[in-house]
Amino acid sequence: MRQPGSSQTSASTLSAITIFIKGSGGLYLKGGLLAALLIVPAFAIQVVGILDQPLYDENGLQPRLLIIPFVVITALGLVLGRMFQLAQQVRHNSDKFRSVADVAEDFIYLRSIDGDYEYVSPSCERLLGYPPEDFYDKPNLMTDLVHPDDRDRWLHHIDNVNNAGVAETLDVRLLGKNGRQVWVSHVCSPVYDSSGKQIGVRSTNVDITQRKAFEDRIEHMAYYDPLCDLPNRRSLERTVRQYIDSGSRQKSVFAVLFLDLDRFKNINDSYGHFFGDKLLRMIAKRLVTHAQNGMVTRFGGDEFVILAHHVSDHDQAIRFAEELIDAIEEPFHVEEHELYLTGSIGIAFYPQDGATPDELVKHADAAMYRSKHGRQEKIKLFAPDMIKQAAEFVSTENSIRRGLEHREFEVYYQPKIRIADGAVVGLEALARWNHPETGLLLPERFIPVAEETGLILPLGQQLLDQILHHLERWTERGQAVPVAINVSGRQFLDSKFCDTTEAQILASGIDSGLIELEITEQVFMSDLEATVTKLVRLKRHGIRVAIDDFGTGYSSLKYIKTLPIDTIKIDRHFVWGALDDPKDMAVLQAMVSLCDGLELNMVAEGIETEAHRQLLVDIGCEVAQGFLFHEPMKFDDVDRVLQDHADKPEE
């Protein structure tokens, strides 16, 4: 038996056989086909050896060698039988693989190392709309079906499997024949032959579209506001961080705009939260429409944050903010109501105003607070001193809560004087805070914070209790005069305002005609229909109503004549300006004529000089208040004034 690879090759063996036959005296030819036995046992297409031996010598047939063919043929039969069994097993395994793959839900295919498809399961047509034949005809079809946004990842993935021999799994989007987008988990591994050489790849594509949709819903819930369907605070932080990472590499600039709607709480208090939610969705939609390339996020409540990566300087940022404010101030129509809103915006820039998402949002918020509580500025750029102001806001809020608990707030009164004879015809109630550390504080130091935080509601109720108690004392003495009470928008638009106010007055036993509520034009016009409804109700209970600071807001004769009001209060700036400006004088005279024509009472505020008083006499204004007559005073001091200036009948 000679093994392959020995010094004698198959060619040399055949040569030796030929020579031996020629030199045997024809002995091999005498035996016919059995004269020589050449056996080539093979296994798995590999030659394992060669056996050659003549059956005759010069003496004739060698009987001892007759056993060799029997042994060899028996061995050959065993080898061939094993080969047949293996072939059967291979065919069985192949049939078994195909029978499983053909009915599998997953899309399975085998590809050669050259890229040709050797097997494609029928499920490809169910998943993608393409039959197996399309893959056999187009070797690049699978790559063509990969979503363009995923193709680079796909090619890198296939390269790893083909060239690096690495088994990998990749989640990728495929585009079906009908345009449907299918997410698959592509599990791909190399296939090797018996010598360890890679001869192809085996791939299984599992449909994970539903899983991805579920993951997307979870992602959406985590990073989007459910009410407005805008990115939420968490999404804002993630995106700002991405902007910062990009900005630090490219040395770019972007702006963060913090928008807060003014007095939105009043709308919720007046109409309920479902109405307010509907309005918020309309606001969100309008902001997105006008945000250009900016990202609009809902920070919470009535606060929105806009990321403006297209803004690179202060002028651009302010123009962008003005466009957003203009959009907000366009009227909204909700359930047959026409609503007018205003907003305040603070702006912070990366990197000059902050290096982290928290700093940028915090500083934009601080700038917004300054714009909201500043001098009628709707937009404000961040400055370092604003952080201190924001901290003071929180401190003031906490102090107000403590002050309410300890009843540190007190009512002062400023008399209203009939100019003709100096008689006290009414009082205006003014809030003061007896702060234990800083002393007496005027309203501008705490009322804005109280309105912003909602503390104005318990504060207003506490002050009304004091006023009713004082009126009770004056009524007992026969000195009672009407008291005007300033009502903020947050109070008036609260859904329980009428209920609580009427209940307090009723419980006190005081004549409701002694109470006059002063409300600004801005509050009236925020929702005229709801305002009129409330005013009618209050008037029905005998409560009087005045428009405060008339002429400084949304004055309109069309609306004024329809409002159920009793008094118009003229803002001090018209009185002061009328001394030097003929236009202001004309406006003031028109206001007096308006009140006469509509049969409304008129009160001029801020009278500080004799010239102011004489001006009012000249134009026919009969009632005024100001430092010329009296400064605001405590309850005990009002007693003495009422004694000295008892109401005198007109002559």
Image: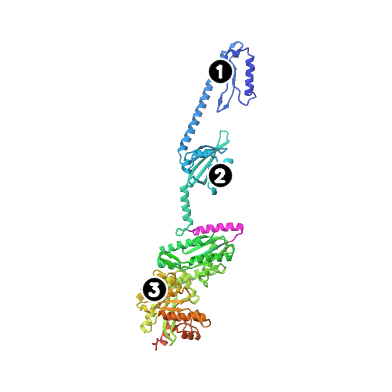
The answer to which quarter of the image holds residue 466 is bottom left
The secondary structure type at the circle numbered 2 is helix
Label 1: state its secondary structure.
helix
For this orientation, the residue located farthest to the bottom is 651
Sequence-earlier tag: 3 or 1 = 1
Q: Nearer the viewer, mark 2 or mark 3?
A: 3
Q: Position of residue 468 (x, y in %)?
A: 38, 78
Residue 6 higher or lower than 368, as above or below? above
Q: Is residue 247 magenta?
A: yes
Name the main secondary structure of what is drawn in magenta: helix
Q: Quadrant of residue 416?
A: bottom left
Q: Nearer the viewer, mark 2 or mark 1?
A: 2
**Residue under circle 2?**
157
Residue interval drawn in magenta: 230-254
- In this image, 96 relative to 114: left or right? left
- Name which residue lies at 53% across and 20% down: 73
Q: Identify the residue position indicated by label 1 in the image.
A: 68
Whole-percent x, y for residue 575 in the image: 49, 81
Q: Secondary structure at mark 3?
A: helix
Query: Given the image, on which type of amino acid does mark 1 rest?
Result: Ile
Mark 3 residue type: Leu
